[in-house]
Image (cartoon, rainbow, N blue to C red):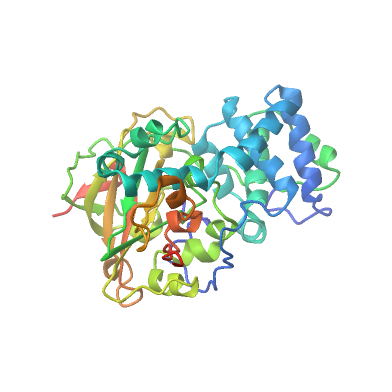
Amino acid sequence: MSAREPMQRPVAPIERRVDAVHSVLARHGAVRDELVVEATRNADDQWVPANGARIVARAWSDPAYRARLLANGRAAAAELGFELPRHHRHLVFLEDTADVHNVICCTQCSCTAFTIIGLPPDWYKDFDYRARVVRESRTVLQEMGLSLPPEVEIRVWDTTADTRYVVLPLRPEGTEGWPEERLAALVTKDSMIGVARIAAPHA
Amino acid sequence: MDGIHDLGGRQGFGRIRHTPNASPFDAEWEKRANALYGLAVRAGIFNMDEYRHAIERMAPRHYLSASYYERSLTGLASLLVEKGIVTHDELERLAGGAFPLASPSAAGRSNAGDAPRFRIGDRVVVRNEHVAGHVRMPAYIRGKRGVVVGESPPYPFPDAHAHGVDADDEPTYDVRFATSDLWPNGADDAFVHVGVFRSYLLAAA
């Protein structure tokens, strides 16, 4: 049916619609079973927030790396072995400070640096976040558990093109002298989206 | 197009269903749908701008009631029909029921002939344009003033790339807008940054 005609018969269950598209693509030659397995494995195991966490931990530990990361995120990510899809031609790390808090979104769809921070969480793609975070950032962050002092400037980044943004969160206090692996374990996907700050570890 | 997908600043939505470090997927079929669209892009059946635009062309009632991965699958299936790889009838026969697809596309367009170049710190204004085809200018910045804070390498121009129209690649500028300019007296105080294609911008007077 086209969108304008009245519905003639029930819509097929979503799993059946996926099966139909799957069989068409297999017949066309674009899809083989092992490619589906590989793509699913990438989503589960390769595109994970631990990648971005390693970058953040290095930036916290090494001022020269931090400078390179802020100057050219794509090249600095590649130094640690992390690639972006070809069409993501630019990767910008957004530096949080005591006075500035960054948060990313995609109001029109779901764009993220998914090879660096993992695929976007469900709520990031929901209408509520997409509609509200650009206009009511402080309220939305507060609802999500992040109450920022009123003097902290909020910078929202709407991912409307193929440049990708990742938040470089504040290093929590009480982590002086920690090795990178231990620092990286603190860094969450939410903190690299900017809807959470990283809590100081318990002494 | 001024489609239902263009949600930035729309009011009436509710609390975010946030759980810390939520899964990207809620069901197994979603992983497969995600893999299928990625493989279709990799095989060169369509590009990302065509894919995004196909989702935007879904009937608003369907768009709003579908989950994210149902929208993704609908965009993918619509392009397979539009590219002549399968007919709509065959898709519905394979699925054993109705398979709603996106509405047809309007025409695309090429770069603006008079688009200036900008530098960091330049004051700019977003052109007051209503584009029938694909466009990556969110409506909330239309006609608004901001300041350039960054520049990207050149990208395919989405308004052309989604429609098979010839165009030059062009950079996007990260433009900083104050929410007090975007929604006077109607927003939390903050700055919003948008990656704006050069063709969408003019120098501010």
Of residue A16 and residue B2, the one placed in the foreground of this image is: A16
Find the residue positioned furthest to the left: B205
| Above or below B173: residue B7 | below
- Please say if B117 is above or below A86: below
Q: Residue at x 37, y 55 (%)?
A: A157
Q: Is residue B187 above or below residue A15?
A: below
Quarter holding the C terminus of chain A is bottom left
* Residue A161 visible in the snapshot: no
Quadrant assignment, res A133: bottom left
Residue B123 place in picture, x, y as percent: 17, 53
Q: Position of residue B20 (x, y in %)?
A: 56, 63
**Who is closer to the viewer here, A194 or B1?**
A194
Q: Position of residue A161 (x, y in %)?
A: 40, 44
Q: Which residue occupies the foreground of this view, A152 or B199?
A: A152
Residue displayed at 42% across by 59% down: A194
Q: Is residue B12 visible?
A: yes
**Residue B132 on image: x %, y %:** 45, 47
Tell me where residue A26 sits by quadrant: top right
Seen in the picture, residue A30 relative to B36 is either above or below; the reply is: above
Residue A78 horizontal side relative to residue A111, left or right: left
